[in-house]
């Protein structure tokens, strides 16, 4: 918020925020992202404010606590078992290079406007269940050891069961 305020006070032409497609009730993180979108809209009379809601992105050097990196690391290490939900949730996994390309396009488009609020959603356009995704990673890594314990963990409250991204 301080960066947004400083940008507005300094005559910045465009502010791009990275948001999440997660429901605001999932966590404090997702709630704060949704609140910041409201702040962006209030500043859109001073500059271009672009809000970019990202699907589940992944790539090299990702934070090891994020789902994809954690699954890969666990399977590479041949851990005994991985406790998971039933895995029926469907996610739109998008590679980080595609996210970077999308944000670059959004930035270029933003420069064509004087001010205003613009919302974009970025994903691959393909939904994959968590269970299918994890099984595929296990197969690709040739891991015949780790037990995938689907159903050991309950779904989060307000869990999004299928992402619905508007890629238009």
Image (spheres, helix red, strand yellow):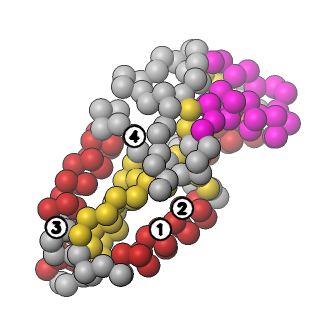
Neighbour tally class for label 1: few under 14, some 14-19, many 20 plus, Cα within 10 Å: some
Residue 11 shown in magenta: no
Residue receiving disc 4: 22
Q: How far apart are marks 1 and 3 (CA)?
A: 20 Å
Which residue is pictured at 55% across the width and 38% down the height?
91
- The residue tagged 3 is 43
Q: Earlier in the sequence, mark 2 or mark 3?
A: 3
**Residue at (23% x, 70% y) in the render:** 116
Q: Which image quadrant is residue 99 in? A: bottom right
User: In the image, is residue 131 part of the stretch drawn in magenta?
Assistant: yes
Give SS at disc 3: helix
x and y, in percent, of residue 76 in the image: 75, 40
Q: How many marks?
A: 4
Q: Position of residue 46 (x, y in %)?
A: 16, 75
Query: Mark 3 and mark 4: span between their CA atoms?
Result: 23 Å
Magenta stretch bounds: 127-150
> What crowding class fits label 4: few (fewer than 14 Cα within 10 Å), some (14-19), or many (20 or more)?
many
First reached walking from the N terminus: tag 4 or tag 1: 4
Label 3 environment density (alpha carbons within 10 Å; few <14, some 14–19, many ≥20) = some
Residue 8 drawn above or below residue 77: below
- Expressed as whole percent of the image width and height from the top left, the position of residue 162 reads 50, 32
Residue 120 appears anywhere in the view: yes
């Amino acid at each position: 918020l301080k960066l947004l305020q400083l940008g507005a006070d300094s005559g910045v032409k465009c502010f791009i925020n990275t948001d999440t497609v997660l429901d605001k009730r999932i966590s404090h993180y997702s709630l704060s992202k949704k609140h910041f979108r409201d702040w962006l809209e209030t500043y859109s009379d001073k500059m271009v404010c672009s809000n970019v809601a990202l699907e589940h992105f992944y790539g090299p050097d990702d934070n090891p606590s994020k789902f994809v990196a954690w699954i890969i690391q666990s399977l590479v290490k041949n851990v005994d078992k991985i406790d998971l939900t039933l895995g029926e949730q469907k996610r739109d996994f998008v590679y980080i290079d595609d996210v970077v390309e999308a944000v670059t396009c959004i930035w270029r488009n933003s420069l064509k406007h004087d001010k205003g609020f613009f919302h974009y959603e970025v994903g691959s356009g393909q939904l994959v269940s968590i269970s299918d995704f994890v099984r595929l990673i296990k197969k690709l890594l040739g891991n015949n050891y780790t037990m995938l314990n689907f159903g050991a963990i309950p779904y989060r409250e307000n869990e999004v069961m299928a992402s619905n991204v508007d890629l238009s």
